[in-house]
Amino acid sequence: MDIFGVLDAFAAAAGNGPNWRETWPFGPGYSEGFLSTILKFGLIAVFFLAIGLFLRFLFGPGGWMRDKEFDLPPPGDPASRASAGPPPAAPGPDPGTSCRTPDDPHA
């Protein structure tokens, strides 16, 4: 038996099975009615939600595949400056004058 005979046998066996639309959980198209259509979209939404949660688990804050540099605070973050201690005193006018620096609050 040559290779083409084997391939023909496999093709014939594969062609005799049911069509993939007949094996889909809710049937083909929108012909089954409103409830079947809603169930199809609900199943798709569940798949998308599972994929999204999986990606959040992998790449979200503290995730296994997330770059560690994304979890560091930005260099100009006030919280990182507060944990470092008070800023060094800069030479300049007396504290009682109305001279403002760019880091002073606006209100």
Image (cartoon, grey):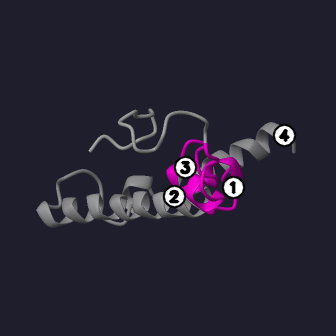
For the residues labelled 1 and 4, the Cα–Cα distance comes to 46 Å
> Is the C-beta separation of discs 4 and 3 under 8 Å?
no
Establish if 48 lies above or below 103. Answer: below
Given residues 104 and 52, the one toward you in this image is 104
Local SS, label 4: helix
Q: Residue 78 location, x and y as percent? A: 51, 51
Q: CA distance from mark 2 to mark 4?
A: 22 Å
Image-based side of 70 in relation to 47, left or right: right
Q: Residues within 10 Å of mark 4 (few under 14, many from 20)?
A: few
Q: Are marks 2 and 1 in contact (CB under 8 Å)?
A: no
Q: How many marks?
A: 4
Q: Which mark is residue 3?
A: 4
Q: Nearer the viewer, residue 8 or 105?
A: 105
Q: Secondary structure at mark 1?
A: loop
Residue that appears at 61% across and 61% down: 83
Residue 65 tag number: 1
The answer to if 82 sits in the magenta stretch is yes
Q: Residue at x 63, y 59 (%)?
A: 85
Mark 2 or mark 4, earlier in chain:
4
